[in-house]
Image (cartoon, rainbow, N blue to C red):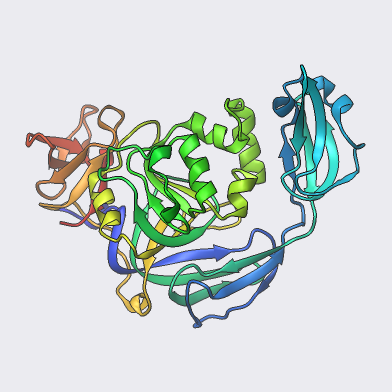
Amino acid sequence: MASVHDALDPVIVEDASYDVGRFLRFPGEILVKTGDRVEPNTPIGSASASAGRTRTLHLARELGVAPDTIKRYLTKPIGSHFDAGEAVARARKGLRAVTADTPEAGRLSDINEIAGTATLAPDAGTQELESLVFGEVSQVVDGRGAVVRAGGARIRGVIALGVDSSGPIKTAVDRADRELTPDGVTADLRGALVLGGMTVSAAAIRKLAEVGARGVIVGSISEGDVRRVASNAATEPPARSFWQSLATNGPLAPELDQTGFTIFVTEGFGRKPMAAPIFSFVSERDGQTASVLIPGSERPFPAYPLLCFSSAGAALADAAKPLAPADGVVARLIDPQHLGTVVTCRGEAFSRQQVNGRPGAVVEVELPNHTQRVVPLANLEILRRA
């Protein structure tokens, strides 16, 4: 028989309430109190975005010069102020000049001649934090934000890059295993969260940003394409330095962050089709407004990015609960050999002796080819109830 210990947090939740954290990146003023009802555009708080924030400029990479020579290419001395879009450094490449521009106004505070980078301290700005969901404030964290009890439907993602965003869903491909190419990006996607199927390239992401889309939802994405988008160049920057910079500075790419663009991934890195139940769930909500909420170091939860379809009054619904395997429950396998394979449970979890001689929870599942197999519960991720 299944027990409470066999229940798993489902990827897809529908007609239930769930908590989301809305937190400022820096300490600031909180504008709501416990018990307040909020809508997506309700202000939660505001804060100065200047305290302690810096941005790394990859000057050597952009100019194509040796890291230890970047000082000689600076257009102004260290400590100078630069306007947004102003050239920080300039080099000659044959008959043409190559420049590295600052993504936002600020002061050049440091040079790293080993990495070939410069540090920009951006001018003071203000972060205005909105709820992005319908719900009720269940907890206020002084100076940082609030927990909102939202309700309706939500999908748990694996990776999300960019910033929190919202907009109507627009389906741009007809199948979960189709790639959204640049040719498929049209002007009518402006303001939308675009359902893109299996994957999307750096070129297609840039075109989506150009037409004014708010984000893209895909099954998977190439790690190299993420770096190409962030560098705005044909070749991607070195992986280690890029991900270290992203972890430190947060924003993916200035031109995407300024427009509130988000990449929401349901399966992971690589070229994996979106799980068919997830694709169907989102495409059935074409035209409905959704929000992407991304966890960060300043936001204790959710631990995973969420795609939320919240609605007024739904916060009063029963709270989302873990779901135990049962006949008809849809799941996917997460072991390396069968990663992403969608299966249907054919019964509850039961105990069976493992290779190590100890008992462990297992589940009988039906694969897409209609064969059945017993798999460890640890290799199973619940997608949705039957």
Q: Furthest-front residue in view?
A: 95
Residue 155, relative to residue 339: is it above or below?
below
Q: Is residue 214 above or below residue 274?
A: below
Please determine whether, in this image, residue 284 is positioned above or below residue 39.
above
User: Residue 354: where, in percent of width, then height?
Assistant: 20, 32
Considering depth in this image, is 385 or 289 the residue closer to the camera? 289
Q: Is residue 28 left or right of residue 139?
A: right
Asked if residue 36 shows in the view, the reply is yes
Q: Quadrant of residue 236?
A: top right
Q: Nearer the viewer, residue 147 or 378?
A: 147
Q: Which residue: 46% across, 39% down?
A: 204
The residue at the point 56 percent across, 32 percent down is 228
Picture residue at 52% right of the left edge, 41% below the top: 206
Left or right side of 194 for 231:
right
**Residue 26 occupies which quadrant of the picture?**
bottom right
Name the foreground residue: 94 vs 114: 94
User: Residue 41, percent across and down?
Assistant: 52, 73
Can the viewer see residue 267? no
Place of residue 259 in the rendered image (x, y in percent of width and height, measured from the top left): 58, 54
* 205 vs 377, nearest the viewer: 205
Pick the quarter of the image with the C terminus.
Answer: bottom left
Give the total number of marks visible in the rendering: 0
Looking at the image, which residue is at 74% across and 51% down? Answer: 53
Residue 65 is left or right of residue 127, and the answer is right
Place of residue 209 in the rendered image (x, y in percent of width and height, measured from the top left) = 53, 48
Residue with the most extreme top position: 94
